[in-house]
Amino acid sequence: MKTTPTDALPEVWQALGETVLMVGVASVCTVLIGTLVGVLFVLTGSGGLWRQPVINTVLGMVINIGRSLPFIILLIVVIPVTRLIAGTAIGPVAAIVPLTLGSVPFFARVVETALREVSRGKVEAAQGMGATRGDIVLKVLLPEAAPGLVAGITLTVVMLIGFSAMAGTIGGGGLGDFALRYGYQRFNTPVLLIAVVVLIVLVQGIQSLGDLLVRRLAHRRSTA
């Protein structure tokens, strides 16, 4: 007996909550870790405020390796790490680990690109006034790069929604798991379409909010 769209509503809400949990926590972890890695990569690179070629090379290799791994393979490879951190390899909480590991390298590159677009003159002016490296990062680089960073965060969250749906296919929970179990495996196209529509609405809402914040930040910076 097929599940009707109405019958599936409680499961849809539960799956949506699991997706929001996975994406929300993974997004926060990604932004925090990715920002740290991206800032360190820029600081230690050529022309950076703290040139460290060895550290920069190692970071670059780690970022590139992380970005080159398909997410579905990463899900399997990091199962021991997931079990160590979350105590299990299945469920939405466990899925946060590979989601974060899979998105940090991408966001680190976003941070790098945004910081490199900051005017060198503003950095030199801050140095001329005796600002420390920490002051330059916190009061010049990050604030000036804010529109690009917010745009990057939006892209990353949207990407994580796609990753979370993929994680659901191997027991991660969320809308991907719902679509697989209640839609695909039961040949129930209407229920499958519900999951697709919910994902589209979620992505569009996040993208619209991100675009609005970017426009406001860009306008504020242009009038400052």
Image (cartoon, helix red, strand yellow):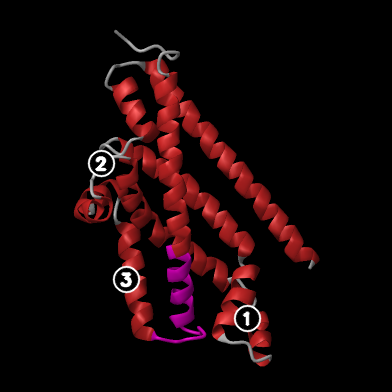
* Residue 37 sits above or below residue 82 on the image: below
219 relative to 113 in the view: left or right: right
The residue depicted at 39 percent of the width and 22 percent of the height is 192
Residue pushed farthest left?
A: 80
How far is the residue under mark 2 from the one under mark 3?
A: 29 Å
182 relative to 206 in the view: left or right: left
Query: SS of the residue at dot 1?
Result: helix
In this figure, what is the number of numbered marks? 3
* Residue 102 sits above or below residue 185 on the image: below
Magenta: main secondary structure: helix
The residue depicted at 27 percent of the width and 55 percent of the height is 85
Instruction: Choose between 102 and 93: the one closer to the eye.
Output: 93
Membership of 38 in magenta stretch: yes
Looking at marks 2 and 1 on the same chain, the residue that comes earlier in the sequence is marked by 2
* Residue 126 sits above or below residue 191 on the image: below
The residue depicted at 67 percent of the width and 92 percent of the height is 128
What amino acid is labelled 2 in the image?
Ile
- Using the image, tell me which numbered label, if any, was put on residue 61: 3
Looking at marks 3 and 1 on the same chain, the residue that comes earlier in the sequence is marked by 3
Quick check: can you spot residue 195? no
How far is the residue under mark 2 from the one under mark 1?
A: 47 Å
Instruction: Choose between 22 and 38: the one closer to the eye.
Output: 22
What amino acid is labelled 3 in the image?
Met
Residue annotated with mark 2: 90
Query: SS of the residue at dot 3?
Result: helix
Q: Which residues are magenta?
A: 33-52
Residue annotated with mark 1: 120
Q: Are marks 2 and 1 in contact (CB under 8 Å)?
A: no
